Image (cartoon, rainbow, N blue to C red):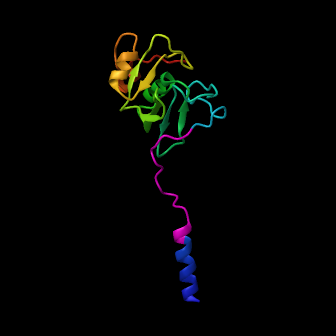
Amino acid sequence: MKTLSLLVALTLSVAAPTACAKKSLAAESVALDRVECARCRMLISTDSGGGQIVSADDDTRFYDDIGCLAADWRARSGHGRAFVRIASGGWGDAVDASFARPAAVATAMGSGIVAFALAADARAADREGRALTFDEVVRTSGDPE
């Protein structure tokens, strides 16, 4: 009986999920047309030009516009890890991305901010030939609401 009890206890401890396990701080997929922007509350119909904040402590916060992400990042004092949709596709860490405000780009909330993997691509696309860092976008971004 002791052997059976020990076997059951060992099996449960291996099979049971760990409640204290830390969540991976990686970009998550967006459930389009089902999730609201955490800042402006508009339904997110495309993740193009969007972003997200992933935190080990909170649910992932999704954004329809990099301007919304930047305003919320500032308000939350940089809690978590920010990701942006890169213009060429895929998610990238906001800190590693370069940002531009191309002349003829429309974004969900009108910030006009687009993320690029390379600073040279951002400079080439920007209407003033600049490549902005995430910190600069956060500092200069007006509240898109």
State the residue at coordinates (34%, 15%): 130
Q: Is residue 11 above or below residue 35?
A: below
* Magenta stretch prevailing secondary structure: loop
Q: Quadrant of residue 115?
A: top left
Residue 68 covered by magenta stretch: no
Q: Which residues are magenta?
A: 13-29
The one of 9 and 98 positioned closer to us in this rendering: 98
Residue 27, image x, y percentages: 48, 40
Residue 100, image x, y percentages: 40, 18
The one of 125 and 45 positioned closer to us in this rendering: 125
Q: Is residue 34 left or right of residue 65?
A: right
Residue 26 covered by magenta stretch: yes
Q: Quadrant of residue 106?
A: top right
Q: Is residue 125 left or right of residue 41?
A: left
Residue 56, image x, y percentages: 46, 46
Q: Is residue 127 above or below residue 37?
A: above
State the residue at coordinates (49%, 17%): 111
